[in-house]
Image: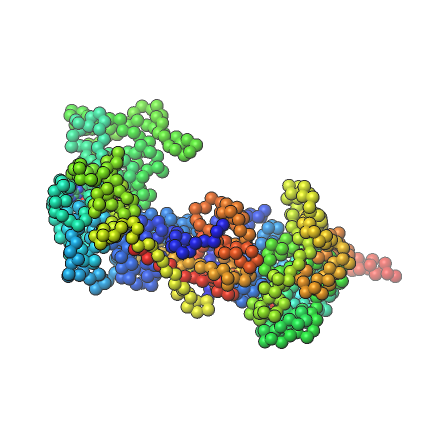
Amino acid sequence: MSFLKSKFRHPKLPRNDLGLTQQAYEGPLSTLCAGCGHDAIGASIIQACHELSIPPHRIAKLSGIGCSSKAPTYFLDKAHGFNSVHGRMPSIVTGANMANRDLVYIGMSGDGDTSAIGMGQFAHVVRRRLNMLYLVANNGVYGLTKGQTSATADEGSLSKQGQANPLEGIDLVTMAIQLGATFVARSFSGDKRELLPLIKAGLSHNGFAFIDIVSPCVTFNNHAGSTKSYDYVRDHVTTGAVTDFVPVEEEIIVSSSDSEAQDICLHDGSILRLQKTGNEYDPQDRQQALAAIEQSRQQDRILTGLLYVDPAAQDLHEVLGTTDKPLNSLGERALCPGSDVLEVINDSFR
Amino acid sequence: MKQTDTQSPEHFHKVVNCQYACPAHTPVPEYIRLIAERRYTDAYMVNWQSNVFPGVLGRVCDRPCEPACRRGRVEETPVAICRLKRVAADHKEDIADRLPTIPTEKNGKRIGLIGAGPASLTVARDLLPLGYQVTIFDRDAKAGGMVRSQIPAFRLPEEVLDEEVDRVLDMGVETRFGTDITSMKSLLEENFDAVFVGTGAPSGRDLKIPGRDEAGEQVQVGINWLAGVAFGHITETTKNVIVLGGGNTAMDCCRTALRLGAKAVNVVVRSSYEDMKASPWEKDDAQAEGITFVNHHVPKDYVIEDGKLVGMRFDVVESVYDENGKRSLVPTGQEPVFIAADTVLVAIGQDAKFPWIEPGLGIEFDNWGMPVLNDQTLQSTRPGLFFGGDAAFGPENVITAVAHGHQAALSIDLYCQGKDLVEERPAETYDLISQKMGVHEWSYQNVVSNDERQAVPHMDLGDALQRIDAEVELGFDERLALKEAARCLSCDVHTVFTTNRCIECGACEDICPMDCINFADNGEEQDLRSRLRVPACDSEEDLYVSADLKTGQVMVKDEDLCLHCGLCAERCPTGAWDMQKFILKLA
Ligand SMILES: Cc1cc2nc3c(=O)[nH]c(=O)nc-3n(C[C@H](O)[C@H](O)[C@H](O)COP(=O)(O)OP(=O)(O)OC[C@H]3O[C@@H](n4cnc5c(N)ncnc54)[C@H](O)[C@@H]3O)c2cc1C
Ligand SMILES: Cc1ncc(C[n+]2csc(CCOP(=O)(O)OP(=O)(O)O)c2C)c(N)n1
Ligand code: SF4
Ligand code: SF4
Ligand SMILES: [Mg+2]
């Protein structure tokens, strides 16, 4: 078994605007099971951050507990990292984000971590519209604890032992839309062509971005009868909106000559380009999104792609009117202005 | 693109860049692995089987394998393949009991080999175990050909050559040394069942420009002079020596002159330093010994004073390249340059010549005086008469002579059995053997060493120049050898892909350190190359393309920079990738 990846890389690896190759965004060799969807998600995160030229040390990756929550170890080893308690990643990101709004926050969670023990935390971080990208690597099981059926498992899906799940699964994208998320997508770890632009767009979105990523557990939930296996997902995927991500600087070159496409301009000037697929899916229509998701579910289809976006949304800092600088850059004078200032504040309430 | 054809060995063989580049297809990674396991005798035998002269070649081989070595593309420098070969030879134990047995009962076929160079010796080595009776003729008193007469002892000690030449002769060759063959016609009257011509390219070119006749013995053809030194007829030289030419013969001449007492040795070359034909390491060694290279000088005349040669004059030129990169040497218009010399060694090329082959024997020659041959079977236009080594297509090197020897021996064997040399020639085949030992365990060293190439130690320069037969390179000691052997990427252990096992999880694509593996929509080769993770539009290395996968995509692996680290196979949940050792079965 290899514990190290060779230090050699392709000499012609592309460099980004920071002059970095993808190697600067990698992590150590994964110890997840071979073929785990979570590693494919990690690879897409590496590629997205590299292509967006985000300085690796300006990223914070946070997670809870689970194989999915362990996955951040294996990407972005130069980023800040926090492996929190089971289901508590949202609180930690909230604190970190409130203190330092300048970092790029990636929360990596699992279906167990989010839809079971962490459900309360999840609901509130969505509602708070924290500026972050929240990813759920959704495999329908508790992988780390040997494959117990989780709350997102579909009704009727068979466990490895052959038992049918008697309960309806929680649909995280529906919940996220209802709770006020302003960027909601679903994708599949086995389809990087779809996943990569979604991750890039989610990172560029201002406000709470959520991607539910079906990510097969090769060890406990990749058998026939499971609705989260590679084969089942490939056979049951329906794409809502096919999305390309156009970064800020390329915008002019690509321009809207392609009349088949609809552009959505994000907060930072980058563009989400929706290809016309013939199904006329409009991801800016919240009601239609919810209806389409429900309709697919009833037809045993997994609706993927960008499901809903509000490009003009405000994030929590804007809503609360907080200071526009990270607290650690404010200095003692600003943070602790003294008793005479307190006097003035108190007086204003008298 | 079509799915890669893995029926013939071509694809996998090409991936083993070193082995593919070696004219004799020596299984390089296999013997390096044996060295890494300190199984030197086994490593030697793998070599001996393939190239007959591992001790010789481990010192003087032209090493076409090294520029081909993948390590040179992955980082800066290739594995020191040639030096490792020498390690096997230096550290081996007695191999007598591993040599093929020679049948006491012969098969009744008699083969005549003309010339006792590496080409003929290889033919003999291959045919003797099959029961052939072999007779070798050479005008020299000992076997070895130019390896003995030309390659100086400071690069190749005589004992090393003797050992490997004698091993062949001791297999039961009838030797007729000291016999100059002056008539093919009378040789053919000896009624051999087949004859092989391995007479090399022994005719060195002279440089006939004004003053040549007056200069007389002071101007010498390089290869004749080197042979004189090798056979002990020449033991000293003069103070100022000019060597004309920029190839390996020139390098041997200048370094030999230094050892015979010359004080100033100038190698004067028409081309630029970069365009000189000599191998880079030979140029380095010569310069390290204090030889001066004078480039861009074209000989004009020999300067004679009082009936004696005192030097030469040269026109100065510069290299001009046209848009196709073709070079021409253009005069600069400068005054001719005089360089003093009391001896001039001419090393500007050599030719194969066959004045002793009479017309009318059915042996055709082309316009350049070279025999007309089938380049696979090496048979001439006269059935049963074969050519090989430098005599076949002009001067090459020892390993090419060996490769020709193998092909000729195969042809001779077929010919003597009355078989068709082309139609009934056995095809090359191959085996692939899985290296899987356990879940993530391989029977080869898959972890890639990060070490840089180890330099081979040299003896003290002052001492080296004192004795003509002091071998300059000391060879790797065991510590250096193991470090260097660990640099080999084991390119013969292939990533073999089984399409119907792949579930397209992408794990292999993600883990590959060199971004070799891609899952993509199929297309024409150039299109596909442009869409790889790292595009490879002008690469010479092949793509490995699978059949259609379930999603309709194909797996495309760019073989160029694969480290053969096996990570793809370790990360694959279904065993769609396996690491399998390639064993080429030459006929
Ligand atoms: C100075 C010099 C240095 C070299 N250095 C290297 C090196 O470092 N590495 C390398 O790989 N190659 C080197 N070479 C090339 C290499 O020596 C030859 O390519 C190789 O020896 C060719 O082998 P061969 O068997 O074809 O013929 P040769 O080795 O040339 O042997 C031919 C034999 O035939 C004999 N012969 C010829 N005509 C007759 C006749 N009519 N009757 C009887 N006998 C005859 C000759 O005496 C000779 O012994 C060098 C060559 C020279 C000149
Ligand atoms: C407070 C607490 N409760 C329970 C556990 C046990 N536990 C560890 S991981 C896990 C479930 C993880 O499932 P999921 O988030 O889906 O991750 P996966 O391993 O499937 O990627 C549980 C219940 C724990 N570590 N901490
Ligand atoms: S148990 Fe399942 S989720 Fe955990 S690493 Fe293995 S495949 Fe991935
Ligand atoms: S790791 Fe194996 S199963 Fe997964 S894509 Fe690669 S070859 Fe296919
Ligand atoms: Mg899970």
Number of disc labels = 0
Give percent across and percent down for residue B31. 32, 58
Residue sitting at x 21%, y 32%:
B206
A32, B585: nearer the viewer: B585
Q: Position of A26 compared to B326: left or right?
A: right
B220, B510: nearer the viewer: B510
Quadrant where the C terminus of chain A lies? bottom right
Specify whether residue A149 is in view. Answer: yes
Give percent across and percent down for residue A177. 74, 61
B233, B163: nearer the viewer: B163
Q: Position of A160 compared to B544: left or right?
A: right
Q: In the displayed image of the protein, which residue is found farthest to the right?
A: A350
Quadrant hosting residue A322: bottom right
Residue sitting at x 23%, y 52%:
B418
Residue sitting at x 23%, y 38%:
B364
Give percent across and percent down for residue B302. 22, 27
The colour mode here is: rainbow
Residue sitting at x 40%, y 59%:
B493
Quadrant hosting residue B506: bottom right
Give percent across and percent down for residue B162. 18, 53
B215, B20: nearer the viewer: B20
Specify whether residue B56 is in view. Answer: no
Quadrant hosting residue B320: top left
